């Protein structure tokens, strides 16, 4: 998903992000604020994923919201 589109839809989908990645806190979601790079970074931090793994998870998840 285009980063601008993602940022615009963030308030609608952040609850779904929390369901998908339960280790993300409400504070994490506030910091992410619809920015793909921040979400990918938090996935790396919370789940120990490599950058490529985190981006792949994001890409698979975001297809639902295109």
Image: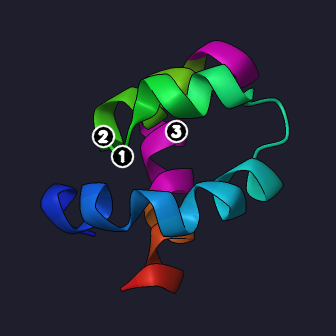
Q: Nearer the viewer, mark 1 or mark 3?
A: 1
Q: Name the residue under label 2.
A: 35
Q: Is residue 31 left or right of residue 19?
A: left
Q: Which of marks 2 and 3 is in front?
A: 2
Picture quarter with the N terminus = bottom left
Q: Residue at image x 81%, y 57%?
A: 19
Determine the secondary structure under disc 1.
loop
Q: In which quarter of the image is residue 45?
A: top right
**Could you say which is closer to the camera, residue 63 or residue 31?**
31
Q: How did the renderer colour the structure? A: rainbow
Q: Which of marks 2 and 3 is nearer the N terminus?
A: 2
Q: Percent from the top left, x then y, of residue 31?
A: 45, 22
Residue 22 seen anywhere in this rendered image of the structure: yes
Q: Residue at image x 46%, y 35%?
A: 39
Determine the secondary structure under disc 2.
loop
Q: In which quarter of the image is residue 44?
A: top right
Q: Is residue 21 above or below residue 32?
A: below
Q: Does the magenta stretch include residue 26?
A: no
Cα distance in 3D space between marks 1 and 2: 4 Å
CB atoms of marks 1 and 3 within 8 Å: no
Using a 10 Å C-alpha cutoff, classify the residue at mark 2 as few (fewer than 14 neighbours), some (14 to 19) or many (20 or more).
some
Q: Name the residue under label 3.
A: 54
Q: Percent from the top left, x then y, of residue 47?
A: 73, 24
CB atoms of marks 1 and 2 within 8 Å: yes
Q: Percent from the top left, x then y, of residue 54?
A: 52, 38
What secondary structure do most residues of the magenta stretch adopt?
A: helix
Cα distance in 3D space between marks 2 and 3: 14 Å
Q: Name the residue under label 1.
A: 34
Bounds of the magenta segment: 45-58
Using a 10 Å C-alpha cutoff, classify the residue at mark 3 as few (fewer than 14 neighbours), some (14 to 19) or many (20 or more).
many
């Amino acid at each position: 998903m285009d980063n601008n589109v993602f940022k615009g839809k963030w308030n609608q989908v952040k609850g779904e992000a929390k369901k998908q990645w339960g280790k993300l806190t409400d504070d994490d979601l506030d910091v992410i604020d619809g920015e793909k790079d921040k979400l990918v970074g938090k996935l790396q931090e919370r789940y120990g994923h490599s950058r490529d793994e985190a981006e792949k998870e994001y890409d698979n998840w975001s297809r639902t919201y295109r």
